[in-house]
Structures are given as structure tokens and as C-alpha cells.
Image: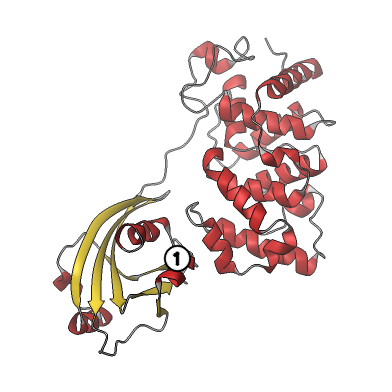
Amino acid sequence: MISPINEPAGLLDFSSKLIRWYHRHHRDLPWRHTNDPYRIWLSEVILQQTRVAQGMPYYLRFVEQYPTLRDLAAADEKEVLRLWQGLGYYSRARNMHQTARLIVQELGGNFPASYAELIKLKGIGAYTAAAIASFAYNEPVAAVDGNVYRVLARIFGIKTDITSSGARKEFTALAQQLLPPDDAATFNQATIEFGAIQCQPVAPDCLLCPFNDVCYAFAHGAQAQLPVKGKKNKVRDRYLNYFVVEKEGRLALRERTTKDVWQGMYDFYLIEAAEETTDLNELESDHVLAHWLEMGEVVRTAGPYVHLLTHQRLYARFWHLRMPPERSLLLPDNMAFYNQEEVEELPKPVLINSYLIQYFFS
């Protein structure tokens, strides 16, 4: 059995065994071949809420487009969001871009070199700050993400709800005790990687696990119960009616400026309803839509498409309105017509982009 957590021999045995596993089994990922804090930070932001297989192409494109922190800081936000398109959680990209500008403008382009300074930056939380500090500077600070919660909870039998207020402090304290101060980078990488490919959420590879002789979850058949996680927030249903206005081959789009999903992205004119509808008469109280229906005609409807977000389920229906070229059309102040090339360059939610590919750009 692993020695009690307060015994140095037990800590050393756990850490050395984990690091040996890492050297044999870790994946060859590009951000593991650099100590550039910018590229490490970029990889960590992209991999929040994103699997490695999905995030890798984005990382490579960002590095190609913005090889340095100054390149990212100098970019237009729309360009950054366009490159981010498809990853979701777009606030990550906005915060990253704003923080890059802050580092260039206020810190002389020098990335902070300690956990204490990193965590002060917008969009950089406790885990990301620890990851950058340890991977780039080998600062002996534990990086605790969902993978680490799972590994520690299962092996050490920790039954604290990981969504509770004290969980991060408890798990971080344990990880900090386990961390070898002279090799923080490897230990943090190893713990995260072990949770990602060995101690997975579903069907962990327990038979070939180097800790199966001491793991609490394996001994008690509790892999499915650990880590303990509170009930998820209720998913909210939303019913979106998009009006795709076309005139002379151009489409009318608008930038989403409110603090809602997809802020800073572009979509069509939207009327949100309390429930799903297939009858335009139920929406004609909207004066903009009423004007458009007088001017043109509905040539196609599509949907509903179901689009899942973390706490929302979107039901989207698209109404394609074609306008005669000879008639003057009023648009809301935040809308404009764009040709196909311009539309393709705009940052758009996946839902909107998928519709355009299916009906306009195929």
C-alpha cells in the first residue's frame, strides 16, 4: 500500500512511479517541446473544454498565424474569433486576445514569470497559472484540472464533491504534497496525462495501471462513483428563429454585441420565441420582420436544428427571405449586407456556418 500521505517515502514512491509511467506512455504533443510561456498558454486556453484531437489543428493554425505574443496582440479581434470558429466558448479567445494586448502594452511584452503574477491576468485561473508557471519556469506549484481531480480522488479515495467550495483547496494541497519540487513540470504533465489516457472518466485501464495495488477505487469497485460530482445545472431550452435576408446575392448579418452566447460573432436577424413555431404569423408583431415580409418573399425554411451548449439546448429554424433588387430595404442599425467572400471571412457560430455551407456555399 502507499504510505500515509504525510510520510515522505509514500510521496516519493507515488511521484516517481507516476513520472516513470509518463516517460513511457505520454503523447508527443507540440506544446511539450517548448518552454515558451506564450505557446504553453495558447495550448492551455485552447484545451479548456476541448479534447486534444480537436484542439491540435487550432493550436497549429494559431502558432502559424500568430507565432509570437506580439503577433497575437496586434491582430484584429474579428480575425482571432474567425480563427477560433468551431471551438466554442468564445470568451476564451476574447480574453486571450485582450490579455496579450495588456502584456504588450503594460508589461513590455514580457510574460509574467511566476504563478502569483500570472493569476492576476484576465482569463488565467488557478490551473492555467500553475500550468504555465510549472511548464515554462518549473516553478514548484501543482496544476490541478479535471484529470487531476479524477486521479487523486480514485487513488486516494477522496469523496469530497469536486464542485464544492473547498474542493480545489483540498485537492491542490494533496497535489502540492505529492509534487517533487525539483521536477514540477514533469509531475504536473504526468498527472494530467495519466488522467487523460489511463485513468479516463469511463472505462479506465485499471488492469494495466501502475497503481492498481494501492488504488482505493479499484479495490472498492468505485471507479464510476469517484470523483464525486454534484448535480449538473439544468439545461435551458431556447427557440431561435433566424431570418436570412438575401438581396442581389448578398446576405444581411449582424454582430452579436450583447453578453449572451457567441458575443462578437456574426449571425442573422433573430427573433427568439417562448416555444417552437412554424407559423410566421406568430412572429409578425416584430416590426422589422413585418417590413421584410411586405418587401420580399420566403423562399425556403430549414430546421429545426438542435445545437447543444453547456447549459443550453438551442432549437434553430431558418427562414430564407429573398428581396427584389429594385426595392429599397431597411435594415436595423447593427446589420449590413455582405457578399459571399465577406461572409466567409466573418467569425460565425458553428450553427450559422453549417447552415451557410449547406445552402449557400456548397
Horizontal relation, residue 358 to residue 200: left or right: left
Q: Quadrant of residue 190?
A: top right
- Across and down, in percent, residue 1 comes to 67, 9
> Measuring 19% from the left and 70% from the top, which residue is drawn there?
299
Q: Is residue 48 visible?
A: no
User: Which kind of residue does numbered mark 1 sit on?
Assistant: Glu
> Measuring 76% from the left and 19% from the top, which residue is drawn there?
16
- Across and down, in percent, residue 151 comes to 60, 26
- Across and down, in percent, residue 217 comes to 54, 17
- Across and down, in percent, residue 12 comes to 78, 19
Q: Is residue 141 visible?
A: yes
Horizontal relation, residue 13 to residue 302: left or right: right
Give neighbour class at mark 1: few <14, some 14-19, many 20+ (Cα, 10 Å): some
Residue at the far right in the pictured view: 182
Q: Nearer the viewer, residue 191 or 318?
A: 318
Q: Nearer the viewer, residue 214 or 186?
A: 186
Horizontal relation, residue 36 to residue 151: left or right: right
Q: Quadrant of the C terminus?
A: bottom left
Q: Is residue 120 above or below residue 101?
A: above
State the scheme by which the image is colored: secondary structure
> Measuring 59% from the left and 68% from the top, which residue is drawn there?
77
Q: Quadrant of residue 23?
A: top right
Q: Nearer the viewer, residue 179 or 81?
A: 81
Q: Is residue 248 above or below residue 271?
A: below
Q: Nearer the viewer, residue 222 or 19?
A: 19
Q: Quadrant of residue 127?
A: top right
Q: Is residue 351 above or below residue 151?
A: below
What secondary structure is marked by label 1? helix
Q: Which residue is mark 1?
A: 344
